[in-house]
């Protein structure tokens, strides 16, 4: 789906029918776009827009979703996620055996440090995007766990490093920036159910004592292809109940637990997570489809899952401390920070990290 003859547009308003015709050509070779207009624009850390299309010949999607780098936030993306991971993933041709958006074209301009993705408009097929204020049902979470299991099993162990199309994939390692978060402003937003160990944390304890030690374990154990950022705000539910994952900008390789814990601990209410997490981890293990010699035991899965709370806790306390805006609305961030905080106490995350690293 890579379309090298196309340049990355500097402004979505300047996207021409000819440009869009070529962008759609791989999946809609007989379609000729006659008009392109902007239906919706929603810029954040990236430039994003829904474009409406008309055709003079053939058939294609009535609307598409386009995403490109925002010039004001390129350095932030470089530090926290990486500019080209998502377009490289979707231009690689590798199989992603879970529900995800169709990508028509994935363009990279390394000289300008820019990219552009032309993707399906998920709302056109009735997909329901979710965030922390609308947690998943058990059935939806089960679908997500099975999807992650299929993905991870497909690239488990040496398969991820020996796949030529993924030779660009970087390991998941600690990144800079979390240490600057004004943590007390986030902690004061949490409720009375929050474990005392969380409420008493300093930013140094959170980042240096909890988050970084866990993140460093991700490359010291069997690795796989990670979505890298599968929190509930990067999910959607299809009309038939399948859970999908979007926004693959943090795609990395590393231990499976990052995806599984980050997804599950934030996607359900605290009560539902407590009630169903062990059964959902068994669903994940069954979906891996690995031979017995490669399949992790439930004891190992439980240990690494407990440790994985470190990632969600650090990221969403840091996000909530910013007061909302650029990354997420404050109420969305606080709801997620609360779920990871409760999981930190329930699952004795500090002890699990000590057991893994000790």
Image: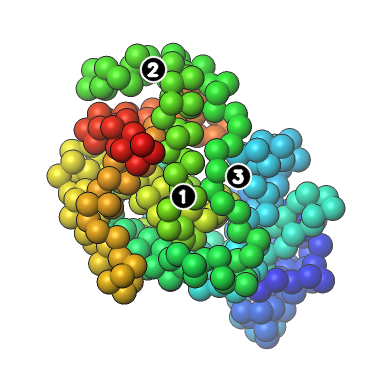
Mark 2 or mark 3, which is nearer to you? 2
Q: CA distance from mark 2 to mark 3?
A: 25 Å
Q: Which mark is residue 201?
A: 2
Label 1: element kind: loop
Mark 1 or mark 3, which is nearer to you? 1
Q: Residue at x 37, y 50 (%)?
A: 257
* Above-or-below relation of 349 to 144: above
Coordinates of residue 219 in the picture (x, y in percent): 49, 50
Coordinates of residue 128 in the picture (x, y in percent): 39, 55
Coordinates of residue 228 in the picture (x, y in percent): 49, 50
Q: CA distance from mark 1 to mark 3?
A: 21 Å
Q: Nearer the viewer, residue 12 or 101?
A: 101
Q: Residues within 10 Å of mark 2 (few under 14, many from 20)?
A: some
Label 3: element kind: loop
Which of disc 1 and disc 2 is earlier in sequence? 2
Which of disc 3 and disc 1 is earlier in sequence? 3
The residue that label 3 is drawn on is 81
Mark 2 or mark 1, which is nearer to you? 1
Coordinates of residue 182 in the picture (x, y in percent): 51, 17
Q: Which mark is residue 220?
A: 1
How is the structure coloured here?
rainbow
Q: Nearer the viewer, residue 168 or 232?
A: 168
Label 2: element kind: loop
Residue 323 appearing in the image: no
Q: Residues within 10 Å of mark 3 (few under 14, many from 20)?
A: some
Q: Is residue 287 left or right of residue 175?
A: left
Q: Quadrant of residue 317?
A: top left
Residue 250 appearing in the image: yes
Q: Residue at x 51, y 73 (%)?
A: 95
* Residue lying furthest front: 358
Q: Confirm or deny contact between disc 2 and disc 1 (CB under 8 A).
A: no
């Amino acid at each position: 789906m890579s379309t090298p003859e196309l340049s990355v547009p500097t402004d979505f308003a300047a996207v021409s029918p000819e440009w869009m015709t070529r962008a759609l050509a791989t999946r809609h070779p007989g379609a000729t776009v006659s008009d392109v207009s902007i239906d919706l624009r929603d810029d954040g850390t990236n430039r994003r827009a829904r474009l409406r299309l008309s055709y003079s010949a053939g058939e294609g999607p009535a609307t598409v979703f386009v995403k490109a780098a925002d010039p004001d936030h390129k350095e932030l993306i470089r530090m926290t996620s990486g500019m080209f991971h998502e377009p490289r993933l979707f231009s690689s041709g590798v199989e992603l055996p879970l529900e995800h958006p169709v990508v028509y074209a994935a363009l990279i301009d390394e000289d300008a440090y820019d990219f552009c993705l032309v993707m399906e408009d998920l709302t056109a097929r009735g997909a329901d995007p979710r965030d922390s204020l609308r947690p998943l049902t058990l059935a939806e979470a089960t679908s997500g766990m099975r999807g992650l299991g299929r993905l991870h099993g497909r690239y488990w162990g040496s398969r991820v490093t020996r796949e030529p199309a993924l030779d660009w994939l970087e390991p998941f390692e600690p990144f800079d920036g979390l240490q600057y978060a004004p943590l007390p402003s986030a902690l004061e937003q949490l409720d009375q159910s929050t474990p005392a160990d969380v409420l008493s944390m300093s930013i140094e304890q959170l980042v240096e004592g909890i988050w970084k030690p866990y993140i460093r374990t991700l490359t010291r154990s069997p690795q796989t292809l990670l979505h890298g950022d599968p929190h509930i705000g990067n999910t959607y539910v299809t009309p038939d109940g399948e859970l999908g994952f979007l926004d693959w900008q943090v795609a990395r390789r590393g231990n499976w637990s990052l995806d599984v814990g980050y997804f599950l601990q934030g996607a359900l209410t605290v009560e539902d997570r407590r009630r169903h997490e062990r059964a959902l981890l068994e669903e994940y293990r069954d979906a891996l489809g690995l031979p017995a010699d490669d399949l992790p035991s439930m004891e190992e899965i439980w240990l690494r899952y407990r440790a994985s709370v470190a990632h969600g806790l650090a990221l969403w306390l840091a996000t909530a401390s910013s007061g909302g805006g650029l990354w997420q609305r404050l109420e969305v961030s606080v709801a997620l920070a609360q779920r990871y905080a409760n999981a930190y106490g329930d699952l004795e995350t500090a002890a699990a990290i000590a057991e893994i690293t000790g």
